[in-house]
Image: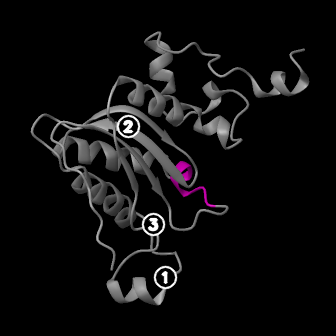
Amino acid sequence: MSNYRRAFVPGATWFFTVNLLQRRGNDLLVREIALFRQVLRRVRQRYPFQIDAWVVLPEHMHCVFTLPAGDSDFSLRWRLIKSGFSRALPKTEALSAVRQAAGERGIWQRHYWEHLIRDEADFQRHVDYVHVNPLKHGLVQRVGDWPYFTFHRYVEAGIYPMDWCGDVATEIRGGD
């Protein structure tokens, strides 16, 4: 078994990537977005954190969030989010023998990627990465067309223009 070393910095800001176990052709996260939001709200009520940026895609998500001062336990929050979502779903997924033996569901990849945000430039790069993801994955022609992320909050605050990153269809046609 691998030993994972994680930095635990109280009050820090983190970037995360969290994936479903079965990614190919899976739209579970957007199909069950209301459930995901409900679980997220419940976890944040018990264990607060500030959502700086978040995108939910069909089979994975990226987010940037900041923990409260004195709190470094992001892993507890992810465990509660993932387990709360999984428990609320009917047991229809195929399970490997290893997951069956461990009593696990076959919804999420076990681990996730985390990155400690180091400074303002690092923060901005990761927030931009979160918000460009629906376009990057070909899910929309314009970033603003994706409904499941914090981009719209940034537009309302005047941080991004609604046409941030342009229009893929226009760029492909050569700017007609």
User: For the residues marked 1 and 3, what is the alpha-carbon distance in whole angstroms?
Assistant: 12 Å
Classify residue 86 as left or right of residue 12: right
Asked if 83 appears above or below 91 in the picture, the reply is above
Label 3 crowd (10 A; few <14 / some 14-19 / many >=20)? some
The residue under label 2 is: 64
Q: Could you say where residue 87 lies in the image, as x and y percent from the top left? A: 35, 66
Q: Which residues are the magenta region?
A: 26-31
Q: Residues within 10 Å of mark 1 (few under 14, many from 20)?
A: some
27 inside magenta stretch: yes
Comparing 84 with 69, the one in front is 69
What quarter of the picture does the N terminus occupy? Answer: bottom left
Q: Earlier in the sequence, mark 2 or mark 3?
A: 2
| Label at residue 95 | 1
Check disc 2 and give the amino acid type.
Val
Question: Between residues 48 and 75, which one lies in front from this camera angle?
Answer: 75
Which label belongs to residue 109?
3
Query: Eyeballing the image, is 132 above or below 24?
Result: above
Which of marks 1 and 2 precedes in the sequence?
2
Q: Secondary structure at mark 3?
A: loop
Circle 2 residues within 10 Å: few <14, some 14–19, many ≥20: many
Q: Amino acid at mark 3?
A: Gln
Residue 46 image offset from top left, x and y in percent: 16, 46
